[in-house]
Amino acid sequence: MLDPSLLYLAPVVFIAGFIDAIAGGGGLLTLPSYLIAGVPPVFALGTNKFVSTAGTIVSTGKYIFHKRMLWPVVWVGLPCSLIGSVLGAHTVALLKPEIIRTVILVALPVAAALTLMPKPKGHKEEILHWRSPRLWVAVPLISLALGWYDGFFGPGTGTLLMLALYGIGQLSFLHSAATARFFNLVSNAGALVTFLFYKKVVFSLALPLSLASIAGHYIGSHLAIKKGAGLVRGMLMASCTILFAYLLWEQLR
C-alpha cells in the first residue's frame, strides 16, 4: 500500500525538480516537505538525495545530449569543487554556519539583482575554451568558493553557482545551468552513497517520488533548452526568492 503522504509530496517534488533543472534550489522545497510529512531528519536527507539524484541524472543527460555542457569548465571546476567541499566541512568546526547565512542573506538580493538586470552594453557571454584565461582564473575561484560553501552550509548551492558562472565567469544562462547540474550531480551522488551505506533512505517514498523528480527535471531541462535565456532568467529569479525566504526564515526562527 502506498504511503498517503505521496499525494502531498509528489507535486512538490515535481515542481522542485522543474525549478532545480533550470536554476537550482529545488532542495529548499523538498527537504522541508519531507519533514512536514513526518520523515525523521536524517532519513529526510537521505531520501531527498536519492530522489534528487535520480532527477539530476536526467536533466544533466539532457543538457549533455543537446551539447550545452562546457567540458573545459566541468573538468577544471570539478576538482576545485571537491577540494572546496572538504575544506568547508572542516571549517564547520571553526566557524558558525549562522555567520555565512547572514552574509549570504545580505549579498544574495544584490547578486540576483545585478545578474537579472539587462546586460550592460559591451557585456559578452563567453564559451570558455582550454586557452581562455578566464577558465583558469574565474572557474577555479568560483568552484572552490562554492564547493566550500556546499561543504560548510549547503542550501542553494546550484543557484549561487549559476549566479557566479553567469556574472563572473560570463557564461550564458544555459551553459551556467548545464554546468551547475553536472556539479550538483557529482555532489548528490557522493552524498547518496554515504546515506545508502548507513541505510538512511526510505525506499517506500524514494522510489515513487523519483518518478516525479525525473518528470520535473526532464520537462524543466527541455523547456530551458527550447525557450532559452528568458525562461532560465525567470526561474533563477524564483529560485533566488525561495533561497532568500529560506535563509530569512532560518535567521528569524
Image (cartoon, rainbow, N blue to C red):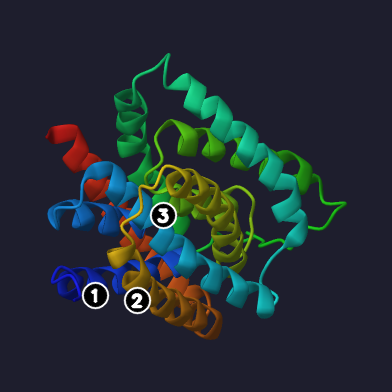
Does 6 sit above or below residue 43?
below
Q: Position of residue 241 (x, y in %)?
A: 28, 55
Q: Residue at x 20, y 58 (%)?
A: 33
Quarter residue 87 falls in:
top right
Mark 1: amino acid: Pro
Circle 2: residue type = Ala
What is the quadrant of the C terminus in the image? top left
Q: How much space separates mark 2 and mark 1, taking CA atoms?
A: 7 Å
Residue 220 x, y percent position in the rendering: 44, 77
The single residue placed furthest to the right in the displayed view is: 131
Question: Can you give x and y, in whole percent of width and height, for residue 90 in the image?
Answer: 50, 21
Q: Nearer the viewer, mark 1 or mark 3?
A: 3
Q: CA distance from mark 1 to mark 3?
A: 17 Å
Q: Quadrant of residue 154?
A: top left
Q: Residue furthest top?
A: 94
**Where does label 1 land, which residue?**
11
Locate residue 3 relative to residue 130 in the image: left or right.
Answer: left
Residue 194 in the figure: left or right of residue 128: left
Given residues 90 and 109, the one toward you in this image is 90
Q: Residue at x 45, y 50 (%)?
A: 196
Of pointers 2 and 3, the one earlier in the residue sequence: 3
Q: Which mark is residue 49?
A: 3
SS label for mark 2: helix
Give the crowd class for mark 2: few <14, some 14-19, many >=20 residues within 10 Å: many
The CA span between labels 2 and 3 is 14 Å
The residue drawn where x is 37% and y is 70% is 207
- Quickly name the residue at label 2: 212
Cβ atoms under marks 2 and 1 closer than 8 Å: yes
- Amino acid beneath label 3: Lys
Q: Nearer the viewer, residue 222 or 188?
A: 188
